[in-house]
Amino acid sequence: MTTDSAKTPAAGRMGYRFNLVGMLALAVILLWGLVAIFAHLLIPYPVGEIVDFDYFGPMSAQFWLGSDYLGRDMFSRIVMGARYTVGISVAAVAIACTTGVVLGMIAAVSGGWTDTLLSRFLDAMSSIPSKLFGLVVVAAVGSSIPVLIFTLSVIYIPGAYRFARALAVNINAMDFITVARTRGESVFYIIRSEILPNILGPVLADLGLRFVFIVLLLSGLSFLGLGVQPPYADWGALVRENIGGLPFGAPAVMFPSIAIASLTISVNLLIDNLPYKIRDRSSQ
Amino acid sequence: MNRRILSLVMSRLLIALITLVIVSFAVFFATMMLPGDTATILLGQAATPEAVAGLRTAMHLDEPAIIRFLRWFGGLVTGDLGTSYANDMPIADLIAGRFINTLKLAGVTALFSVPIALTLGITAAMMRGSLYDRVVTILTIGVISVPEFMVATSAVLLFAVYLKWLPALSLANEVHSITDLLRVYAMPVITLTFVVSAQMIRMTRAAVVETLNTPYVEMALLKGASRQRIVLKHALPNALGPIVNAVALSLSYLLGGVIIVETIFNYPGIAKLMVDAVATRDLPLIQSCAMIFCVGYLILITLADILAILSNPRLR
């Protein structure tokens, strides 16, 4: 790696500082996080109440983002929707990545049959297209928030597993692991104290990417009417219920989509602009 | 050396078959989690216990799940997909026409997106770091990180609402002329092309960039070969495998995209059929549609792997 850093001195000087795009992206993500937490304090009108006489109203000083197909305030609905979109996605990505990464490290450290069986099974799982898996499960069990979180995390466990296993296999071949084994340390100790600290950076970056996939899939399912169910609505469900306003170009259709895009694009940009040291720590 | 390629390809095919069995197992048991008894649901609340018991025997519901799975899987292999719960028609009949519609949509999309994506991806990689490359990269990241329905709604807003070139909704059964055909397919194809091309451009660009970073390309540069010659003679033949792999993998994104696009544009394809079947909880129909999608996906990713093996010059 020394030759690389000699070629690109800028990467070395940057250290752990973020560049401007990364800062902006982080700001947007934090903003949505805060909006999700304090949603109930921010909404100007109750979410379920019909406040406008007109439906698909335009943007105005009274209704900042127009009104929806029943004349409800769109701004309040999007702010409340942030809770479902961000909350469900964060829960799902946490479960998916924790499970996937732990399984991946176990497979890499144990090797042998455990590794082969886990890898074969999870590879097979990942060859079911994600939207389809969501459709089938929701058709079978019906949609509720716990079912959604569970389904979304099951769908993204194989990806997290594969990623963590590939990194852990590299670390596993290093001398300090051999030393730890010779000392007689347990598998649990090796995973926690030797492997995890060495793969944490890339795993966190991967967690961000998976978060984007989960937000997109959740929105897609809600858009198909299989995600968050009325009277609650996440951003995908908001687009679905207002799709009738599309021929009039109503703001109620576009703003929930813009909210999703602002969140997902920000996460992607943040990861792309992460300091080199965090992102690719394993390769150093 | 040819034997080695053959054995690699065969082992890949074998893995695909094993995966297919595991996937069908997963699809079958995911739909078995349905709470409540199917016979009771079908006959309604007022059914007599005798009628329910009769239907249960007729539908083989009283057999253990593993036997029912084997029966269902055997039916799949021999082409007998069972009957739909909702309207008692053979599923094969329901699916046939819809399947062809979806294939048409996918085919037309592939026809457009593959040349567009390859041109943009390869040229962007050649002019790495230029303004053109940056614009292409930012646009593809933009399209990848928004949901498919946003691409679709934006296309409707642009082409149907502001420019008024196309109708907002398409109905494939009202086709009478070439212009009708164009109007029906335009919007779904535009949307899908955007979604699939973005993935393909990103992967193609990465593949070519990786090849351009290799020592033999540097060698060609040092010996004074022109830029065109480096790319066409040295880099592209070696990048071909990864590129073909990228194309096959990105085409698998069609499957996810098609579900959203058929729903939003009311296109009578197999994905729309499946989403409707979810609403009526028509399990045999959902299972069959899911299997068709999984098989399609599996074929594409297996094809991608096999092409990667075949085009690896080190194995020849």
Image (cartoon, coloured by chain):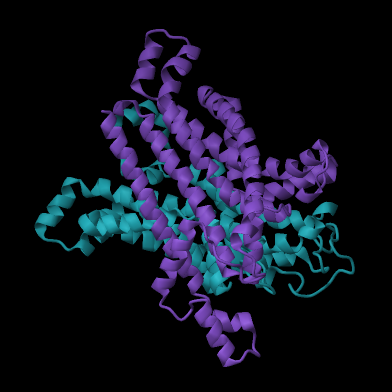
Chain colours: A cyan, B purple
Which residue is at a point 53% across and 47% down the rendered structure image?
A268
Q: Which of B111 and B72 lies nearest the eye of the viewer?
A: B72
Q: Is residue A158 visible to the viewer in this orientation of the structure?
A: no
Which residue is at a point 73% across and 52% down the rendered structure image?
B265
Relative to A208, B262 lies left or right = right
Which residue is at a point 46% across and 57% down the rendered structure image?
B77
Numbered disc total: 0
**Horizontal and vertical percent for residue B193?**
64, 39
The quarter of the rendered structure image containing the C terminus of chain A is top left
Q: Which of A65 and A241 lies nearest the eye of the viewer?
A: A241
**Horizontal and vertical percent for residue B145?**
58, 47
**Horizontal and vertical percent for residue A241?**
74, 64
Give the quadrant of residue B44. Answer: bottom right
Q: Which of B258 and A258 lies nearest the eye of the viewer?
A: B258
Give the quadrant of residue A193. Answer: bottom left
Q: Note whether B162 is above or below A106 in the view shown.
A: above
**Horizontal and vertical percent for residue B311?**
39, 29
Relative to A274, B275 lies left or right = right
Relative to B70, A3 lies left or right = left
Relative to B157, B316 lies left or right = left
The quarter of the rendered structure image containing the N terminus of chain A is top left
